[in-house]
Amino acid sequence: MTLPLPLLLLLLLCFISYSGSSSISVSGLKGGIVTLSCGSEDREIVDISLFHRSKKIPVCERNCSGRVCKEGSCDVIINNLIYRDAGKYFLHVYYNNDQTEVKRLMLEYKLHIHDEISVKKGEQLKLDVLLTNADKVERNSGSGWTELWRRGHGVSSDGLSVSLTISNFTANDTGSYRVLDSNNETLITVTVTESRTESKGKLDTDDDHKPNEQHNHWVIVPSVCGALLVLAAVIVFVVIRKHQCQNRNADHDPFQGVPMQERE
């Protein structure tokens, strides 16, 4: 016998009960990983579902190579974080309470993405942070937060376009940038510093050469001195030997002491 659809739905609601939701704040670095922990390892998990911005996110459970993977019984790991990952997540965990009843645990997460960027003076700074759930962007250069952009209100900085791009970066553009949603909750925080790579690299190059020059100097000079000493020793030896040969020849000369006129 086939039961009417309303009765089937009623029976389903009788078998599935809902537990309350909780809010968990998590954060991760751009390009890093974050874990959405369910805290239900001791339960018999039937299924899990992950939602972000009202969309269901596929979660890989076995032999995973994707960005979103299941770990353990119901933890979810998000790899290679990007700006778009920021925001609220809802994890539905279905588990068995006994042999006849299935319960659902609904967990809410608020994911905050951190990032650090170093920009050279005069170069372009582009922040791709205008998410669909972004409501405003603020900057703090040490004197408090200043609003740069608000959805529907344009931009308050002349150097900043709607795409949050600074075409000619200067030291005044350094600081912390944060993106907030309509509930004034932070989605993304980016710390921007001025890059010293070029000048530092030049200093490092100069420093690297100086020790080598000193090393070469102290290596080459002893070599030249040694060669000169050897040459001087050779000359002294030749002079002494020549002198000795002359004396030896004089000792064996039968006409030694005889005038040249009388030798004939």
Image: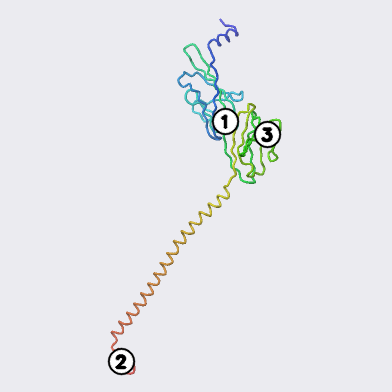
Q: Earlier in the sequence, mark 2 or mark 1?
A: 1
Tell me the distance, in whole angstroms, between the alpha carbons under discs 3 and 2: 119 Å
The picture places residue 236, in percent across and down from the top left corner, at 37, 75
Q: Return the mark for residue 258.
A: 2
In which quadrant of the rendered view does residue 115 lie? top right
Q: Earlier in the sequence, mark 1 or mark 3?
A: 1
The picture places residue 136, in percent across and down from the top left corner, at 66, 31
Kind of residue at disc 2:
Val
Q: Return the mark for residue 187.
A: none
Q: Earlier in the sequence, mark 3 or mark 2?
A: 3
Disc 1 marks which residue?
A: 112
The picture places residue 46, in percent across and down from the top left corner, at 50, 18
The picture places residue 101, in percent across and down from the top left corner, at 50, 12
Left or right relative to 71: residue 255: left
Left or right relative to 255: residue 86: right
Q: Return the mark for residue 149.
A: 3
